[in-house]
Image (cartoon, rainbow, N blue to C red):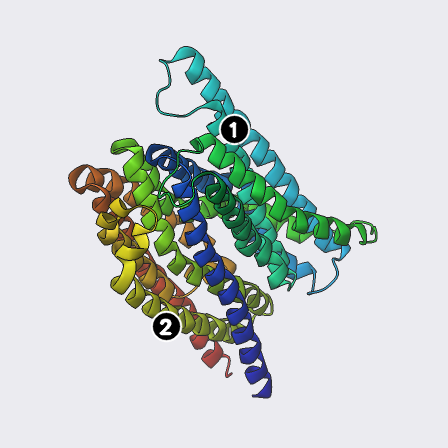
Amino acid sequence: MRKSLAESRGLLWQLLLSGMMKGGGGLLTFVCFIFIARSAAVDEYGLFSIAFSSASLLCYVMVGGQHTAILKFYPRVNDPGPISPAGKSVILRSLRILGRLTLATSAIILGGWFVARWAGPPMTSGATFSLVAFTLFLSALLGLAEFFSSLFRARGQTLAGLWPRDLLWRLLMIAVFGLILWLNAPGKLRANLFTAGELAGIVAGLLAAALSIQVARLARDMSKVEKARDPFPGHLGADMQRSFRSFWALGFLWPARGQLGTIIVGLMINPAAAGAFFSAQRLAAVLLMVSVAINTAVGPEISRALAANDLHKAKRVFMTGSLVAGSASAAFMLLLVAVGDDLLALFDPSYRSFTPVLLMFAIGQAVFNACGPLGVFLTLAERERTVLLAGVVATIATLVGVVILTRLYGPIGAATAIAGVTVLLNLYLATVAWSVFRGSKRKAEGDGV
């Protein structure tokens, strides 16, 4: 009993810490994108919105699911604390995969851009070389940030895994763009100071500066690991190889559904509409930070519980995360209903018309949060193929729904498609998770536990 209470207090502390970090990061994201929006013309900000959404999607192609793999496999060979030889081998294996995928993805996209530039008609869509190159650079850094976040959390260092990207990067963007606006366009709602490519380059450079802290810390810790003969457990390599494709596909499909809207709205309507749609999505993403905070805190705990074959503890952690996420989501939904239009107007007064889009995003995200850390639990409970299949179906449904409903109803149609598929997907995964819990209960009763 005392152990259970101590575990609950420890988990609640981790939830509070990650909630403060992710919630604070979400609010800072909202503020920094206001400054970015005001430092460029409406169309340039729209192009940057498309580029940022593309980078947020491509980063999961480049990371290759290693942010999930490290969270699952590192705790199996390394307790919290110093890195062991086996832990170092797991880290290096993941980093090699990440590096190869980043180089391959960048080569394919840049090669395609040059071919299109040489063989096709003049490019008038704004896809300049600088925009494409800086988008790829940003993609690689976002993928590395995702990996570092999972790695440090797997090591039991939640704060070290979160604050460089979630706080420092956002604060740097606010400071830099705020200073530039104050020096060059004081008091103006919008200033035409940057192109979309320049915005992407500045944002990527600031992220590189923030991540340098984690790079230095990991390099220092890895240098202290003593060499050992054959430190990598043979069965673990087979497990990692077997999980690679599933983790890669899952890592790409989950965020793909959210990023498709901005890209498709920009292509089907115009960059200005994409900028407003993206701003509504960024504001609703504060709700997303609730689920990210929950996953950040409970992921390592669930991983360790399942590794110890303690499904009862895994269920207890899962239910605690669901309760906290649902309560926080309800409170934020009330805030958006009350002042959502005023918050959108901070980007641009014309964005008030996108308040229904904002609320539709928020409804889908609130249901997602209330269902708990389903993706994390099912993936770590060896149900990644079930999650993958559901994710494939959901992504296809989202793509088709966004294209059709955007053509019929505009941006609100795109938001409805994304939110609707999100709700249905999570309700389905909730039934799968509940069947896992019921199965473990029946097994325990059959064993006389």
Task: Return the residue nearer the eye: 385 or 334.
Answer: 334
Looking at the image, which residue is at 44% across and 12% down?
118
Q: Secondary structure at mark 2?
A: helix
Q: Could you classify mark 1 by the number of other residues whose Cα lies within 10 Å: few (under 14), some (14-19), or many (20 or more)? A: some
Looking at the image, which residue is at 72% across and 64% down?
81
Image location (x, y in percent) of residue 53: 41, 41
Can residue 145 be seen from the camera position used here? yes
Going by the picture, which residue comes out furthest to the left? 408
Looking at the image, which residue is at 31% across and 39% down?
274
Query: Marks 1/2: CA distance?
Result: 42 Å
Task: From this view, report whether residue 442 is shown above or below residue 200.
Answer: below
Give the residue number, with chain letter if any, for mark 2. Answer: 327
Q: Secondary structure at mark 1?
A: helix
Of labels 1 and 2, earlier in sequence is 1
Marks 1 & 2, CB-CB < 8 Å contact: no
Looking at the image, which residue is at 64% across and 43% down?
95
Task: Return the residue nearer the eye: 421 or 386.
Answer: 421
Mark 1: which amino acid? Answer: Ala
Give the residue number, with chain letter if any, for mark 1. Answer: 133
Q: Give the position of the N terminus as an image quadrant.
A: bottom right
Task: From this view, report whether residue 390 is shown above or below residue 410.
Answer: below
Query: Is residue 382 rendered to the left or right of residue 91?
Result: left
Task: Return the residue nearer the eye: 369 or 301.
Answer: 369
Image location (x, y in percent) of residue 103: 59, 31
Mark 2: which amino acid? Answer: Ser
Asked where in the image residue 333 lies, by quadrant, the reply is: bottom left
Image location (x, y in percent) of residue 123: 37, 18
Q: Could you classify mark 2 by the number of other residues whose Cα lies within 10 Å: few (under 14), some (14-19), or many (20 or more)? A: some
Can residue 265 be seen from the camera position used here? no
Asked where in the image residue 9 lies, by quadrant, the reply is: bottom right
Task: From this view, report whether residue 448 is shown above or below residue 285.
Answer: below
Task: Return the residue nearer the eye: 442 or 333.
Answer: 333
